[in-house]
Amino acid sequence: MAKSKREEIRVAGLNEPLSHYTDAVRFGDLLFVSGVAPLDGAGRVVGGNDAAAQTRQVFLNMKQILNAGGCDFKDVLKVTVYLTDVNDRARINPVRKEFFGAHRPASTLIGIREFAVPGMLIEIEAVAGIPG
């Protein structure tokens, strides 16, 4: 059996990581996507105080990362959603459906007090299965 190879994936044009991490790591047939923030390429929060608009930016950024790893939203197996207000769940769910369509990943929602970047309302991490 061949040994699995670890590959770090960094997507040009996305905001620079705030610390020592990369956008995603491919290991075998899995893609582990770091927490994706609602930031533009310059590191500015997109969407203001609108959780749905911030979520849309998160998924636009995640799409680039998934594509760089050879995946799409239909390949996502698990997401972990971090929200500063869990009541925003109702506002973000329609945006999730826009990107995932009929595909439903396993999901965990966690309410937190704050993020490293002021103004962020949401961050989402994911695990995807790389199609083979």
Image (cartoon, grey):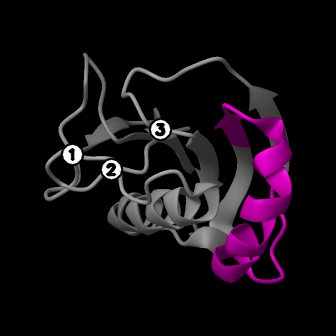
46 vs 1, nearest the viewer = 46
* Contact? badges 1 and 2 (CB < 8 Å): yes
Give SS at disc 2.
Answer: loop
Q: Give the residue type at disc 3.
A: Met
| x, y percent for residue 15 | 21, 45
Query: Considering the image in quadrants, where does the N terminus appear?
Result: top right
Magenta-span inclusion, residue 84: yes
Give SS at disc 1.
Answer: loop
Judged by depth in the image, the label closer to the viewer, 3 or 1, is 3
Label 1 crowd bin: few (<14), some (14–19), many (20+), radius 10 Å:
some
Circle on res. 120: 3
Return the residue at label 2. 39
Residue at 14% across / 56% down in the picture?
A: 12
| x, y percent for residue 24 | 39, 41
* Contact? badges 2 and 3 (CB < 8 Å): yes
123 vs 70, nearest the viewer = 123
In the image, is 95 to the left or to the right of 7?
right
Magenta-span inclusion, residue 27: no
Residue 50 vertical position relative to residue 125 in the rendered view, above or below: below
Circle on res. 15: 1
Q: Give the residue type at disc 2.
A: Leu
> Which image quadrant for residue 93?
bottom right
Query: Considering the image in quadrants, where does the C terminus appear?
Result: bottom right
Region rendered in magenta? 80-105
